[in-house]
């Protein structure tokens, strides 16, 4: 925690969403920039702008206010590199280079120091231990510890890392891992309410089945946003997931009412539309949810901001505020200049229809009085309609890194340490370039030092 006096003395400043991008242009090789976890708290208090942390205070003092922000910030960063803003005995540049935070003391990760000072006959300390990783795979993916005879057999393996991969391949087909995928899916979908196909608000089981299907069996995880099919369990309670192109019963048609050309994975399930569009003509909650859960940017934390100045009439960037909610105001606009254009492509999807049968439907004339087209923006680039939106999302580095992070955090119960930045980058770039096959990425993950070093 920062001292109260510092918080009271911290100069007031509006959030500058472009600052994190400028920071990573200057420090492209910094672990925080490689892993994509640079946020406003690099310079600001944990509560976010306007209060600065000590590093932000020093930058603010070095900033030439007579120049454009994007020109002045790199010079200010350079001016404070030699300072020790947080007083922990390490310069700002050194902290940035190793991945710790120059504005916070006591944040260096001791876990990044190899455990080599003591000996342990049961583990290979200071590097990858295949026996340790093998036992961990047994627990993480099969749901049980190794038996004595299995350990003895592994000890005689000529190719221990190959044996780790063979065990993982077997465990990925286990009922236990199917339950794990369901649990991971819950963290992404965040379901509430009953799981009934007759529910007006939709049955979130369809969402969880799609998540499990797209992230297993060597399939393309891009189907989390691209899928124009449904996933059913057949036979019922068998755990066997099957994709179907069209509803076969009235029950299935009610549960998933959209025609194929308007289906886009998790975003357009009946549950997702009913719960996150509800009655809003501009589906901000819908897009902000999956911008956070599958693209890694939480707009409420000022992450992933790409301001689009639609209004062009104020001293600050502002959206058009098409539904007159006050989004143009200076205190709101810093987020809404990203959020609103992000949402426009999805405005034809109905949320809840209390008087008719259009819940979760696509309606050609919905919200056309406010939004005549479905043109919008994603990552600051123009997109025209849902298909262009999901194409850009799925092919982005952000999608690959976020999906990889979802599984990394579940298995490791933490984010990657800064000393693991290179390994983590290898995982998500491998996912991106390898057909977005999650199981292949997991095979790579269990061979990393992050996973296999005691």
Image: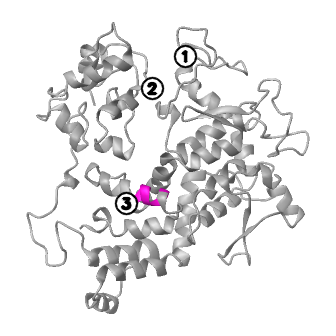
> Whole-percent x and y of residue 246?
82, 63
The residue where tag 1 is placed is: 317
Q: Which colour scheme is used?
A: one colour
Q: Quadrant of the C terminus?
A: bottom left
| Direction from residue 90 to residue 397 in the image, left or right | right
Asked whether disc 2 touches disc 3, contact meaning CB atoms under 8 Å apart, the reply is no
Q: Are marks 1 and 3 in contact (CB under 8 Å)?
A: no
Q: Badge 1: how crowded within 10 Å, few (<14), some, or many (20+)?
A: some
Q: Which residue is drawn at 56% across and 77% down?
A: 175
For image coordinates 42% across by 82% down, the residue present is: 166
User: What distance separates the C-alpha of mark 1 from that of mark 2?
Assistant: 11 Å
Give the x, y percent position of residue 289. 59, 42
Q: How far apart are marks 2 and 3 (CA)?
A: 30 Å
Is 431 one of the magenta-colored residues?
Answer: yes
Q: Where does residue 418 sit, x and y in percent of width and height?
A: 28, 48
- The disc at residue 412 is 3
Q: Does the magenta stretch include residue 52?
A: no
Quadrant of the rendering where the N terminus is positioned: top left
Q: Determine the main secondary structure of the stretch shown in magenta.
A: helix
Dot 1 or dot 3: first in sequence order is 1
- CB contact under 8 Å: marks 1 and 2: no
Please provide the residue range marked out in magenta.
427-432
């Amino acid at each position: 925690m920062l001292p109260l006096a510092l918080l009271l003395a911290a100069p007031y400043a509006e959030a500058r969403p472009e600052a994190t991008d400028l920071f990573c242009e200057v420090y492209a090789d910094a672990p925080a920039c490689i892993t994509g976890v640079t946020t406003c708290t690099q310079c600001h208090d944990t509560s976010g702008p306007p209060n600065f942390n000590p590093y932000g205070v020093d930058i603010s003092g070095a900033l030439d206010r007579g120049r454009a922000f994007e020109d002045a910030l790199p010079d200010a960063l350079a001016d404070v590199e030699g300072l020790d803003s947080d007083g922990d005995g390490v310069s700002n540049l050194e902290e940035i280079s190793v991945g710790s935070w120059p504005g916070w003391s006591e944040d260096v990760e001791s876990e990044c120091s190899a455990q080599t000072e003591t000996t342990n006959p049961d583990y290979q300390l200071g590097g990858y231990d295949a026996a340790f990783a093998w036992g961990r795979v047994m627990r993480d993916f099969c749901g049980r510890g190794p038996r004595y005879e299995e350990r003895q057999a592994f000890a005689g393996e000529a190719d221990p890392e190959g044996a780790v991969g063979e065990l993982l391949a077997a465990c990925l087909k286990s009922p236990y891992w199917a339950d794990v995928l369901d649990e991971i899916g819950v963290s992404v979908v965040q379901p509430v309410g009953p799981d009934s196909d007759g529910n007006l608000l939709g049955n979130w089981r369809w969402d969880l089945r799609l998540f499990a299907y797209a992230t297993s069996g060597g399939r393309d995880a891009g189907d989390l946003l691209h899928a124009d099919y449904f996933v059913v369990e057949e036979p019922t309670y068998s755990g066997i997931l099957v994709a179907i192109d069209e509803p076969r019963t009235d029950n299935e048609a009610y549960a998933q009412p959209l025609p194929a050309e308007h289906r886009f994975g998790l975003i357009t399930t009946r549950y997702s539309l009913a719960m996150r569009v509800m009655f809003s003509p501009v589906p901000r909650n819908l897009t902000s949810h999956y911008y956070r859960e599958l693209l890694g940017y939480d707009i409420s934390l000022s992450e992933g901001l790409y301001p689009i100045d639609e209004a062009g009439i104020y001293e600050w960037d502002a959206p058009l505020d098409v539904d007159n909610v006050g989004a143009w105001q200076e205190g709101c606009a810093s987020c809404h200049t990203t959020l609103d254009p992000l949402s426009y492509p999805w405005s034809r999807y109905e949320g809840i229809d209390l008087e008719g049968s259009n819940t979760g439907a696509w309606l050609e004339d919905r919200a056309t009085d406010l939004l005549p087209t479905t043109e919008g923006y994603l990552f600051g680039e123009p997109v025209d309609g849902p298909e262009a939106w999901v194409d850009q999302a799925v092919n982005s580095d952000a999608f690959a890194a976020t999906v990889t992070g979802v599984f990394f955090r579940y298995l490791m119960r933490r984010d990657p340490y800064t000393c693991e930045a290179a390994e983590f980058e290898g995982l998500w770039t491998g996912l991106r370039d390898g057909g977005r096959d999650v199981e292949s990425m997991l095979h790579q993950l269990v061979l990393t030092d992050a996973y296999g070093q005691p």
